[in-house]
Structures are given as C-alpha cells and as structure tokens.
Amino acid sequence: MLVFAKHKLVFLSVPKTGTTAWQAALAPYASMIISDPPELKHAPIFRYNRFFRPALEKFIGDDLHVIAVMRAPIDWLGSWYRYRQRPFLAGKPTSTQGMSFDAFVAAYLKGQQPAFANVGSQSKFLEPQRNGTAATHVFRYKDQAALRAYLEARLETSISTDRLNTSARDKLILSDDIEAALRQKYAPDFQLYDSIDANGRYTPVAEPSPVN
C-alpha cells in the first residue's frame, strides 16, 4: 500500500495485480510505503477502513482518493497458480507443482479450500464498507495505460515502470465445466471486473464471500 499525502491518494495493493512494479516506480513520490508484513501491504478495503483510514483522514483530510488494480478473475487465479509452482514452495502445502490449472481451480471452488488454493477473492478485497469506505477508482490490470495516465495526472509527474515479481508463463487450460462453476460461485468477481470502464469508474459489489 502506498500513501501520497500531498496528493491525497492511497494506492491499495491487491495481490497478483502488478503492484510490486508500481511500488518500485512510485516509491520516490510516496509519503508512506507499507511493504511488510503482507497482511498490511495487501490490506483490503475493510482493513484499510479499520486501521489506516481514521489516521489518514485526521492528518491528511477526508477527501482521499483510494485506487486499486483488478485482474480478470481467471487470469488472476492463473497468476496465483503459476506463482505457487515456484521451486521454493516445493513440498509445502501451498505448492501447486505437479498440478493442473483445472485441479487448482476445482480446489478453489471447495467450501474448505486447501492451503494452495486459499487465495481469497478480488471482489471481497474491494468490498465497500457500511460507512461508505470504498475504492474511488479501480483499473483493469490489462489497461496499464489508463492507470498510468491517472497517476501522472494525480501526482503531476511522468512515470515509468519495470515489470517485477513475475512468474513463468505457461498456457492455462480450464475445462468448460470448471469455468462455468467458477463463474457461478464467484459471480461478484466477474461482475465487478466487467463493470470497470476506461477511466477506472466501476459498480461496487457488496455481496458476501461465496460459500457452499
């Protein structure tokens, strides 16, 4: 998570959406960089609302803009699947080595997810709170140009990024029945992503996490 006090901007770090590269590029302009522990670096809306917002509004102002990046749901799961195939996770409960993407997503659909498939959901990360706290703008991961244009205008500077923290790419194969089940059970993620326009405007989704 990045905070830009002068520009009244907070950039939330949704996991697996390229925020490591943006953090590196924007660090010189940030007033506050939350990079560790992961629970705070990747603070979702509810945690931001509870622990960060009161202090930031007290010392910076109550008209903060809160932005985030969202990835297409299947691609987002693919990023988690690839990341957890890395050698350093071999033999651990979070490893996906030797597993197909289909099997990974099938495990993700379970009511009690195994450790390797317990990755949450983007719509839950971005879920608006009862007091109205929500992301001001959400940008699609694939539309980096729109995000850059917004940030350059808001921060009044030109920005360049390098691609960091990437995983090896292989073809993701998802069977039709598993994809259909994913789209049904995690409909809020697909609805939220589909609602995002080129300017980062979106329709908030405030539904409970999917359960069996």
Image: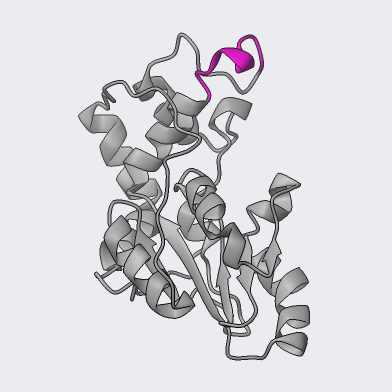
For residue 13, what is the image quadrant? bottom right
For residue 190, what is the image quadrant? bottom left
Q: Main secondary structure of the magenta part?
A: loop
Residue shown at 77% from the left, 88% from the top: 58
The vertical placement of 103 against 184, above or below, is above
Q: Is residue 179 left or right of residue 80?
A: left
- Callout count: 0
Tell whether position 202 is magenta. no
**Extreme residue in the left direction:** 176
Whether residue 56 is visible here, answered yes or no, is yes
Q: Horizontal and vertical percent for residue 25?
A: 50, 54
Residue shown at 58% from the left, 67% from the top: 29
The vertical placement of 199 against 101, above or below, is below
Per the rendered image, the range of residues in magenta is 84-92
Q: Horizontal and vertical percent for residue 2?
A: 61, 63
Q: Is residue 175 left or right of residue 158?
A: left
Q: Quadrant of the N terminus?
A: bottom right
Q: Horizontal and vertical percent for residue 83?
A: 50, 27
Whether residue 14 is visible here, answered yes or no, is no
